[in-house]
Image (cartoon, rainbow, N blue to C red):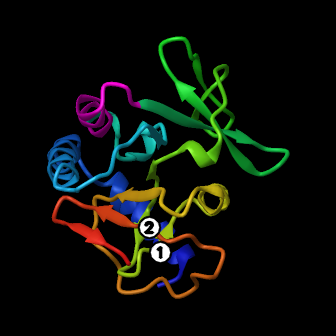
């Protein structure tokens, strides 16, 4: 399946899930996330879910990580449209968030964080394959961001659906995941 085909199919599949289905699946994803043996995490980068697209909320995972590490710093993305890249802002009670023109919540203030500081990234996706290749929304922001992270930065996807056998048009610019967590299991990619 190509990225374009997967993008269309999985957007529709995700939108068809009921609130009850999503809540159950979110609980199962959290249970599987808690099975991971993680190193010390100082900075975790997370997307802010677009509720209208039924993206997986990360709040429950962040609360778990904060419980494990009360000193955890949460980082959220802001799009830099001129450079076609993401900026990374430390997220705390002083940061204001607003919707941009694409309906994505972004920080409007806050302290910048360098990619090299980030220990774990919760990566948004629509679909993924058994090799850890992911299908996002097609603009390449996350692949450019992940290519700047340290080699040991953990890249973890969250999906309501199981892995595809293959994404046929993956290329050398695509940065694969280390793990993807679904309601059924944890996929680990080498």
Q: Badge 1 is on which residue? A: 133
Closer to the eye: label 1 or 2: 2
28 magenta-colored: no
CB contact under 8 Å: marks 1 and 2: yes
Residue 3, percent from left and from top: 54, 75
Toward the front, the furthest residue is 40
From mark 1 to mark 2, how far is it between C-alphas? 6 Å
Q: Which residues are magenta?
A: 61-72
**Which residue is label 2 attached to?**
177
Sort mark 1 into few (<14), some (14-19) or many (20+) by Cα contacts within 10 Å. Answer: many
Counting from the top left corner in percent of width and height, residue 29 is at 21, 52
Residue 67 lies in the magenta-colored region: yes
Q: Residue at x 22, y 56 (%)?
A: 36
Above or below: residue 132 compared with residue 183: below
Report the quarter where the C terminus lies: bottom left
User: Neighbour class for label 2 at 10 Å: few (<14), some, many (≥20)?
Assistant: many
Name the element at disc 2: loop
Residue at 41% x, 37% y is: 51
């Amino acid at each position: 399946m190509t990225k374009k085909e997967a993008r269309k199919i999985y957007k529709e599949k995700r939108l068809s899930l009921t609130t009850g289905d999503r809540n159950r699946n979110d609980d199962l994803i959290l249970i599987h996330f808690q099975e991971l043996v993680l190193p010390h995490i100082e900075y975790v980068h997370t997307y802010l879910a677009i509720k209208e697209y039924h993206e997986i909320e990360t709040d429950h995972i962040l609360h778990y990580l904060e419980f494990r590490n009360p000193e955890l710093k949460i980082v959220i993305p802001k799009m830099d449209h001129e450079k076609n890249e993401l900026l990374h802002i430390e997220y705390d009670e002083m940061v204001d968030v607003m919707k941009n023109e694409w309906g994505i919540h972004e920080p409007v203030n806050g302290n910048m964080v360098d990619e090299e500081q980030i220990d774990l990234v919760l990566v948004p996706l629509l679909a993924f394959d058994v090799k850890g290749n992911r299908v996002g929304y097609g603009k390449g922001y996350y692949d450019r961001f992940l290519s700047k992270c340290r080699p040991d930065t953990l890249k973890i996807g969250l999906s309501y659906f199981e892995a595809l056998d293959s994404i046929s048009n993956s290329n050398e610019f695509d940065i694969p995941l280390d793990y993807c967590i679904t309601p059924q299991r944890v996929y680990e990619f080498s």
